Image (spheres, rainbow, N blue to C red):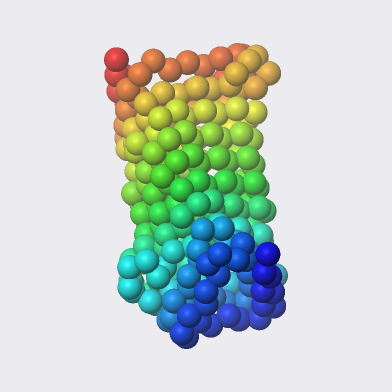
């Protein structure tokens, strides 16, 4: 596999073609893309800087904004902006390993699978996960419209839906090993599972003035499972 290791800034003015190479591209500085990045089907871009990084994609042509696999390990933060030109599309996995990812208020993000292994993600704009969202340690804050089209699992981490945010389309919300989900914005899920046995529980908190709609029978398993409803509404389904 081809490897490109850029310790500073990377600017794509024409085209960077990683198609068919299983390329690994490491970037320690800013990613600036007025041109085309052809990610192919199996390339990985890793943002591994020590100082704050910015991903700025100003190419507005459909299909030229797509990444395949993306990994964030920078604890100082990676901020994504698209210059007002729409989505940042990640065809496969977005993984944050102990890093900080900030999605600003001009960037809609679409990703197949999102994995957080420690670290932090703050989504200030639409965040669309086509498959699973898995949080193993760390914190995810959703400040706008967000969808998870399959399962959402929080294991020893925290998911917060702010008062300006919503979360919909979730099949199963599972909270284990102290995992927490805090809802301050109206949201819907199909089912909620808190813990798989007496030793592994999670905490579901629905704060004042918030409605969480649960469509199917849900359950809290084990003594460690906690549900907190503060002057809020739980709408049960069938």
Residue 165 visible (yes or no): no
Residues 18 and 64: in front is 18
Residue found 50% across the figure and 46% down from its top: 113
Residues 92 and 126: in front is 92
Q: Is residue 231 left or right of residue 11?
A: left
Residue found 58% across the figure and 72% down from its top: 53
Expressed as whole percent of the image width and height from the top left, the position of residue 13 reads 47, 85
Q: How many marks?
A: 0
Residue found 48% across the figure and 80% down from its top: 15
Examine the rendered structure and indicate whether residue 72 appears above or below residue 173. below
Extreme front residue here? 20
Expressed as whole percent of the image width and height from the top left, the position of residue 214 reads 35, 24
Which quadrant: the C terminus?
A: top left
Expressed as whole percent of the image width and height from the top left, the position of residue 64 reads 40, 70
Could you say which quadrant of the image residue 62 lies in? Answer: bottom left
Residue found 32% across the figure and 22% down from its top: 215
Examine the rendered structure and indicate whether residue 123 appears above or below residue 6. above
Residues 119 and 209: in front is 119
Which quadrant: the N terminus?
A: bottom right
Expressed as whole percent of the image width and height from the top left, the position of residue 87 reads 37, 62
């Amino acid at each position: 596999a081809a490897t490109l290791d850029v310790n500073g800034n990377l600017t794509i003015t024409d085209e960077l073609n990683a198609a068919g190479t299983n390329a690994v591209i490491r970037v320690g500085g800013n990613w600036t893309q007025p041109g085309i990045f052809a990610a192919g089907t199996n390339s990985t871009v890793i943002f591994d800087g020590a100082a704050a990084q910015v991903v700025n994609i100003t190419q507005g042509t459909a299909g030229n904004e797509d990444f395949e696999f993306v990994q964030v390990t920078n604890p100082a933060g990676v901020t994504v902006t698209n210059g007002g030109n729409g989505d940042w599309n990640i065809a496969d996995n977005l993984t944050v390993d102990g890093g900080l990812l900030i999605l600003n208020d001009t960037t809609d993000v679409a990703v197949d699978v999102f994995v957080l292994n420690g670290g932090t993600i703050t989504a200030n704009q639409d965040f669309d996960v086509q498959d699973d969202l898995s949080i193993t340690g760390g914190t995810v804050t959703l400040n706008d419209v967000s969808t998870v089209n399959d399962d959402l699992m929080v294991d020893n981490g925290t998911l917060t839906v702010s008062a300006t945010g919503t979360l919909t389309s979730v099949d199963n919300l599972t909270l284990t090993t102290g995992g927490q989900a805090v809802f301050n914005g109206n949201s819907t899920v199909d089912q909620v599972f808190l813990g798989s046995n007496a030793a592994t529980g999670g905490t579901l908190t629905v704060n004042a003035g918030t409605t969480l709609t649960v469509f199917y029978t849900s359950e809290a398993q084990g003594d460690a499972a906690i549900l907190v409803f503060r002057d809020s509404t739980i709408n049960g389904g069938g």
